[in-house]
Image (cartoon, coloured by chain):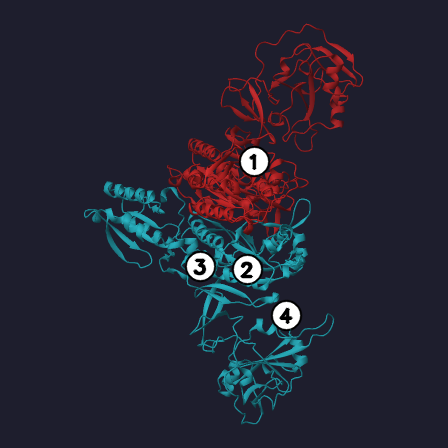
Chain colours: A cyan, B red
Amino acid sequence: MRTSQYLLSTLKETPANAEVISHQYMLRAGLIRPVASGLYTWLPTGLKVLKKVENIVREEMDRAGAIEMLMPMVQPADLWEESGRWDDYGPELVRLKDRHNRSFVLGPTHEEVITKLISFELNSYKQLPLSMYQVQTKFRDEIRPRFGVMRGREFLMKDAYSFHLSQECLDTTYQNMHAAYCRIFDRLGLDYRPVIADTGSIGGDASHEFHVLAESGEDDIAFSSHSDYAANIEKAEALAPSGERANGEMGINKIATPDVHTIEDVCKFFDVSASKVAKTLLVVGECEEGETAPIIALVLRGDHDLNEIKAEKIAGVASPLAFASEEQITAAANCDAGSIGPVDLNTAVIVDRSAAHLSDFICGANETGFHFNGANFDRDIKDYTVADIRNVVAGDPSPCGNGTIEIKRGIEVGHIFQLGEKYAKAMGAAVLNDQGKNQTLTMGCYGIGVSRIVAAAIEQNNDENGIIWPEAIAPFKVVIIPMNMHKSHRVHETAEQLYSDLKAAGIEVMIDDRKERPGVMFKDMELIGIPHSIIVGERNLDNAEVEYKNRIAGDKSTLKIADVLDFITKI
Amino acid sequence: MRTSQYLLSTLKETPANAEVISHQYMLRAGLIRPVASGLYTWLPTGLKVLKKVENIVREEMDRAGAIEMLMPMVQPADLWEESGRWDDYGPELVRLKDRHNRSFVLGPTHEEVITKLISFELNSYKQLPLSMYQVQTKFRDEIRPRFGVMRGREFLMKDAYSFHLSQECLDTTYQNMHAAYCRIFDRLGLDYRPVIADTGSIGGDASHEFHVLAESGEDDIAFSSHSDYAANIEKAEALAPSGERANGEMGINKIATPDVHTIEDVCKFFDVSASKVAKTLLVVGECEEGETAPIIALVLRGDHDLNEIKAEKIAGVASPLAFASEEQITAAANCDAGSIGPVDLNTAVIVDRSAAHLSDFICGANETGFHFNGANFDRDIKDYTVADIRNVVAGDPSPCGNGTIEIKRGIEVGHIFQLGEKYAKAMGAAVLNDQGKNQTLTMGCYGIGVSRIVAAAIEQNNDENGIIWPEAIAPFKVVIIPMNMHKSHRVHETAEQLYSDLKAAGIEVMIDDRKERPGVMFKDMELIGIPHSIIVGERNLDNAEVEYKNRIAGDKSTLKIADVLDFITKI
């Protein structure tokens, strides 16, 4: 490709409103352009990267035995009514009407369409297991699209679905897909982790997210320092502290704590660390429609954060989790939120495992402006249950039994999930089993955010000059930068010869044949992040040499012109 | 691919509601499945064909120097307001609102998005000419989706756009694209014609459609018997008959013609051919808002059809063409529609070139139940203009000057078009020219219906047993059909060995390893239309042979097992 006949579209300035580095560089390097909030055009250079990611994903799906197909983006509403998601899915689901006033959605995912299809196409257990996938444009009407294609509204996704008659069969395909995902991210050249993920309302045990590790990630991932264990912090179990709880030695004491509202205030007032304080949060409990909701107290150590996903799974707690309103707090504890405590509280009390290990601790006294000191479980708080309701923190023992927890940030780029019978039951997807009886199918689903991977790769691989593409997804492998080619016949001739030699060898090569100063070309090509640069200049030509620069290592060397093709081919 | 691990999904019965052969076979061969009216899932076999078409299109676009990009399917309404098409485009344009109540459309085409993009990205004439393309999902809310993917609502399209500063430059790219389109359809192995097409309201001269010739086509194409001339019948010029008009010999005679309403009736009544009769149609003329529309009479020979596209381009005729209502007919001619004629008619009269050549002809007398016999122009009808307002018919002289017109039916699969400045002007797409002055861009656009090509290829290539794919777009090149493999170890072993040999050689091979009777397998593979079949049976194995069958030629032969790989590779 010649830059003079290409739409390079690099920008010198960082566009406003681009908060994260990948968004900034994708705009500056001419990879994408916004069309509207969360909607982007992929410029030629961006599309090249997107297609490379897509091809690696496709090759590994094929290798895993999944069969490619393509479903429509526009889906009839009746399928969503049948699955129940027409009502359950929030405003992220775009609904529209056709000219005949029939309702449709823009597909954010395709469980309904494929399950309905399979319910018609499969008749016999002999056709199972079956895995199908597509690489397709999806639409989710994000409330706040941001970070460019990282959280856009229209995006490219690979979604796969597998069908089975037994959990064992699903498990096998699930492991197979897990391995395929690892191959994909290995081939993409990304630092990633498969992490245990929450299964949400569907339940079941098996769900993994695949995260590209990057500081700017929106998710916290908990790792073991000494094993492969990794889990989304939503899901990572916080073990009970080891050993017995120390016996309380103090008596309980009510102390006036004026102007003490937060845990920080409490620590300052009592001159203790937050780990000696119990904080109490009131949440809404489950109830029948029309009844007054019960209130439930959640007790955590002052230095720990509530894990809402864990909390809402506890029997009796409403899901999704809802915190008590001011009126509900007053009714239940008769004090400000800052003075609630578990002593003599007239609600169910759920104590986090670590908080339950406290003795002689400080907590609210259920009277505005007062706290207890020297509180102890069993003596002062008799009726309570213990559960894991907090986020793990760095230094916690790993739930795998090996090492301690470390926390890193990740960008979710893949998610595999055992769906069980949820959709198959709703859409009537069943086949005759080997006993000749109709049996509902069991399903798995497997997603990869193809366009998001492009952004995640940049978040992980960049420097102050621009993008540093992993070799496998670089838009071009080599760029030839002729210096002042329009003034030097030798430079022109050599650069063109190298260009045609590399092209003839099937190497993706760009030649920067614009009439620009060398400095402008270097900056543009570093920004775009092409792995290998061949710089053709008058000086080196005296020795029949060109300069070679590696974008990753940053090092420069000289190459004999005659060796360039061989050198590049061998990289 | 093994059929046992594939979603073959062939159907024995022709599904109801599938009117054309391509739709029937696409359903029966397991290429597509309906999701809703005009919305289809591409099953694995169908998607393979679609991808092959897509890849040929992509390769030739790249070869033509067009640069691939990808625009969003969902487009903001403001771009369509800027171009004026928000109001002009009918209900085929699906409009929707996002969660913030902002208006969007599902893109039926992308002139607005690309023109706006280019208006930002290009600064200098040095970046021109530039051709960009995408292969992308489009949506058009057809009032009556039909014929499967031939006229679906969601479909895959290649759309390209070129940008220029001069008509000469546009002409060059247009010719280049025309040649690329010919290469595409050549490579696809289809019998097609580039035909001169109407340019609609945009005007300008240059527009070509590419039609795959097939009986079931919706368009009539006019060819010359002796040259390359081909035009959509909408556009093909009907020349004036050669020679002078014969002098009238009869006097004009008003004759009572009770119960004579149609041209057929007239011919019967007077015992003449329709070519001796003039028929008169009343249409609405242009007028200012609020004024009463003038009525215009169009006169054609009884055996000719009005060409509405030609008629509405005549000065004074309303566009789109509207026929006069009953009230308007009564007001203008004071008779039934069947008795209108050009004699003493108080409207403007436009006479088709061929009708104007009539003498001593029959026409309506503007009195219900009466016709004139022996009418003549200039003597009986003084005030009229002559124009080309009819469709050409087979046998007409070709407008190119060589040979006569033949008519065939075609399926439009491509359309190239010189847009001129229409969009560039509306969206402010201009660059500095070599004089340093801002100049509006001139554009071309170039579309190919990728999914429609799959259907068109089947319309053109099929027999009573199923599809006959052109080699370049067959879903598989070879199928191995083992007869009773589950009973014969020899058959099993030979079939599997051939399968792995062919696969290792990079050949797209399917093996039908289902436990089905040979007859079922043969029928399925003929239906799917795989070009080459290798049939492995006990009998031939005695001679170390297999049977080979060619789907196109239909002939069978035997091959030495040892020669199969070589034979298939060489085809």
- Residue at the outermost front position: B542
- The chain identifier of the residue carrying mark 4 reads A
- The chain identifier of the residue carrying mark 1 reads B
Instruction: Look at the numbered disc 3 and give the secondary structure of its residue.
Output: helix
Q: Which residue is mark 2?
A: A144
Q: Nearer the viewer, mark 1 or mark 2?
A: 1
Query: In the depicted view, which residue is nearer to us: B237 or B567?
Result: B567
Q: Which residue is mark 1?
A: B456
Q: Is residue B148 above or below residue B236?
A: below
Q: Residues within 10 Å of mark 4 (few under 14, many from 20)?
A: some
Q: Residue at x 67, y 29 (%)?
A: B322
Question: Going by the image, does B157 lie left or right of A90?
Answer: left
Q: Position of residue B278 (x, y in %)?
A: 68, 16
The three-letter code of the residue at mark 2 reads Arg
Q: Can you see residue B424?
A: no
The three-letter code of the residue at mark 4 reads Ser
Q: Earlier in the sequence, mark 2 or mark 3?
A: 2
Q: Earlier in the sequence, mark 4 or mark 2?
A: 2
Mark on residue A319? 4
- The chain identifier of the residue carrying mark 3 reads A
Quadrant position of residue A503: top left
Q: Residues within 10 Å of mark 1 (few under 14, many from 20)?
A: many
The N terminus of chain A is located in which quarter?
Answer: top left
Q: Is residue A528 above or below residue B424?
A: below
Q: Is residue A305 above or below residue A436?
A: below
Mark 4–mark 2 Cα distance, whole angstroms, equals: 24 Å
Q: Is residue B359 above or below residue A543?
A: above
Q: Nearer the viewer, mark 3 or mark 4?
A: 3
**Residues at marks 3 and 1 on the same chain:** no
Query: In the depicted view, which residue is nearer to us: A524 or A105?
Result: A105
The three-letter code of the residue at mark 1 reads Ala
- Residue at the outermost right position: B258
